[in-house]
Amino acid sequence: KSRLLWQPERESFPGKPGMASTRISAQLPPDIDPTKAPIAFGRRALPKLNEEIQSPEPLTQQHALMALCDLVHDPEKVYQAIQIGFVENLKTLLLHHDSTVRQKTTEILCIMAMHNVGRQGLIQKGVISALAELFDDPVDICRKNMHQVFEMMAKFPEGAADILHAGLIPLLMFKLKSELDEIQELILDTLSNCLRVEASEALSSGAITILKQKLTHSSVTIRSKAARVLLAIGTHPEGKVVVGEVIPVLVSLLEDTDPEVQASATGALMFATVKPQGRFSALGAEAIPPLLKLVAGETSKARLSAIKTLTMLAELPEGRRKLLDHTDMFQQCLNDPCEAVKRAAEIAICVIKWKPY
Amino acid sequence: MFIYQQREISNISKYKLYGNVFFTFIPVQSTQLDLFEIQRQREARRRALARKRAKEQMQLRTPEPVEGREHVHVQTELYLEEISDRIIEVDMECQTDAFLDRPPTPFFIPAKTGRDVATQIEEGELFDFDVEVEPILEVLVGKTMEQALLEVMEEEELAQLWAHQRAYAELRNAELAEVQRLEEQDRRYREEKERRKLQHMQMLQKQKETTEKIAAWAFAKRYLTDLIPSVFNNLRESGFFYDPIERDIETEFLPWLMTEVEETLEKKVLGRMMLDSLIRTVVEKRLDAFSQEPLSGQTEAPTEEPGPIDAAPQEADETEAADLPVTASEESDQPVAEEQLSRRISFQLEEPDRAETEDLETE
C-alpha cells in the first residue's frame, strides 16, 4: 500500500463544536418531515413544486405532492396554483400507476375544492371528467377522495351542472350498489345535490329501486341521505310521480329513532304530497299521526317540513276533517321563534279552515 | 547467477577495428557447476573455436612477414587496452531492500509556549437548562397548538358552513314545497273555475237557444196565421179561382170577336185604300190633262178642283153610304162607334190629301 506523503489538515470549526445554529424563523424548521419536498421561499414555492411534479421520478413527485398538500390549505396558494396551471399536471397525475401519487393528488383536489376559487378553477379545467376515470380505482382512499371532490362540487350550481353534463349520474347510481358505506354516503350527498337541478337521468336509470333499498339500510346516515335524494327527486314534477311509489316506506321512516332520518323523510314526503295522487297515497298510509307527533316536538328539525306536509294533506277533504281536531297544535307553533315556522303554521291553519263555499 | 555479456571478438587488424559489440558465453566461476554444464561449456568452446577457424580461413590474410621482421599485433587506438582472453570479471550484485512499513509520522507537537491556564465550567454556570429550554418549548408547543387550532378551526368553519347550508336548504325546501303546493292549488282552482265557467257558458247557451226557439215559434205562428187567407187572396187575385163561363167567354169568345172585327176593319181599310188610289190616279190624270192646257184650263182647274173635291166627299159619302149597308148587319154599338172613328180617320186621311193637292197646285 502506498501512502501519500502529504495529508490535508483538519479544518477547525468556528465557535464551539456541537452546537446547533440559532436560527429562529416563523416557518417550521427545515427537513422536519423527510417525506416532503423542501418548499422554496415565497412566490417561488408553487412553481418549483410544479416543476417537481412533472419530473419522471415517482419519489420526487410524491415529495412534491405531500408538500403541496399542506400548502393548499391556504386559499391564496390555491389561487396561485390555479394561475400557474397546476391543475393540468394534477389531471395527468390522476392516472399515475403509483397509488400514493394518486391518493395525494385526489387529496389535493379535495382540499382545493373546499375553497371557492379552487372550485371555479376545477370547473374551468374540466377536472370532473378526468376524475371520472378513477371510479374503478382499486385503492379505497383514492375513490373516497374522488367522491368527496364530487360532493363538494355538487354543492353549488355550476358544479352540479358540470357533473350532470359529464353524464356521471348513471355511473354514480350503479356504484351505489357496490361501494363501501362511507363512499355511499358521499355518493348520496352528491346525488341529492345534482338531482335538485335535473332528475330525468336518474329516473331513467332506475333510481327509485336502488333508493328504496337504501331507505331500509342499517346505517342511519345512509337512510337519511337516501331520503334526501328522494327529496331532491321530488322537487321535479316527473319525480313526484315516481316518489309516490315510495310513500309507504317514507311514512314508516317517520317513526325512525334518528331525527335526521325523520327530517329527511318528512322533506321527501313534503314534495311527494304536492300532487293529488301522492296525497291520497299518503293519507292511505296513515301519515297524519306521525306528522302530528313531529310537529308537537319542539326541537325537532322536521317541524317545518311536517307542518308543510300537513298543509298539503289538508288540501284534501278527509285530511281537513282529520286535522280540524288538531288545530290547537298549530296554534302553538305560532309562537315559535323561527319565522318560517310561524308563517307555515299560519298557512296551515288557513288551509285547514278553508271551506269551499 | 549467470551474467550474460554480449561480446564479439572483432577482427583486430592493424588498420581497423570493427565495432565493439561483445558477444560470448563466458562461464561464470561458480562452485556448483554440474558435470553436464561442464560438458556443455566444453562443447561450446569447441564450436566457437571451430567457427573461429572457419572464419579465419575465409578471411583474408595478410602477407607473410618479410625476413627479419615479424608481424606484431599493435593497438592503434587512442588508449591502450590490455587484451586478454580472460576477461576481468567482477561479481556484482544488486538487490532492493524488502519494503518496510513506513513508520507513522510522529505527532507534531509544537513546542510548548506560553503559560498553562485551566478553566472549568461548573454546573449551572453557563445556563440553566430549565429556564433556557422554556422559550424553545413554548415555541414548539405554540406552533403545534397553532397548527392544530388552525386545522380545528378550518374544520369547524366547514362544519358551520355545512350546518348553515343545511338550514338554508331546509328553508328553501319548505319554501319550494309551499310554492309547489300553491301552484297545485292554483292549478286545481283554475281548472275548477274553468269547468264551472264552461258549465255556465253552456247553460247560458242553452238558455239563449231556448228563448230564440220560443221567439221563433211565436213569430212563426203569428206570421203564419194570416197565411191561408192571404194565400187564397193571392190565388184569387192571380186568377186561380175562376168562373168557368166567364173564363170561357174570355178565352174563346172574345178573341173570336176581335178577329172578326179586325177582319171587318181590314176590309174597310182596304176599301178606303182602294178608293184612295182611285182618286189619286184620277187626280193625276186630270192634272196631266190640265197641265197640257194651262191657259184654258186654269179657270177650269179651280172649278175642277172643287169638283173632284166635292166628288171626293161625295164619293166618300157614297162609299160611306155603301159602307153603311155593309155595316148595317152589325148591331152592337161598338162597330158604330168604330165606324165613326173610321170616318174620322178617313177625313183625316183626306185632309192630308187635300193639303197635298193644294201644294201641288201652288207649285
Image: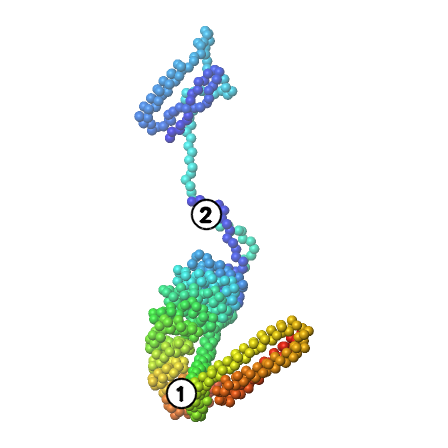
Farthest front residue in view: B296
Residue beneath the point at 39% across and 87% down: A316
Q: Amino acid at mark 2?
A: Pro
Residue marked by disc 2: B104
Asked where in the image residue B251 lies, by quadrant, the reply is: bottom left
**Label 1 crowd bin: few (<14), some (14–19), many (20+), radius 10 Å:** many
In the rendered image, which quarter is residue B30 located in? top left
Q: Looking at the image, which residue sits at the far top?
A: B67
Q: Are marks 1 and 2 in contact (CB under 8 Å)?
A: no
* Res B191 quadrant in image: bottom left
Specify the quadrant that holds the C terminus of chain B.
bottom right
The quarter of the picture where the N terminus of chain B appears is top left
Chain letter of the residue beneath label 2 in the structure image: B
Residue B14 x, y percent position in the rendering: 47, 15
Residue A228 visible, this orientation: no
Residue A57 vs residue B269, the one in the foreground: B269
From this view, report whether residue A315 is shown above or below residue A10. Answer: below
Q: Nearer the viewer, residue B230 or B54?
A: B230
Q: Where residue A314 is drawn, which disc sits there?
A: 1
Name the residue at the right extreme: B295
Q: Nearer the viewer, mark 1 or mark 2?
A: 1
The residue at 35%/75% (across/down) is: A208
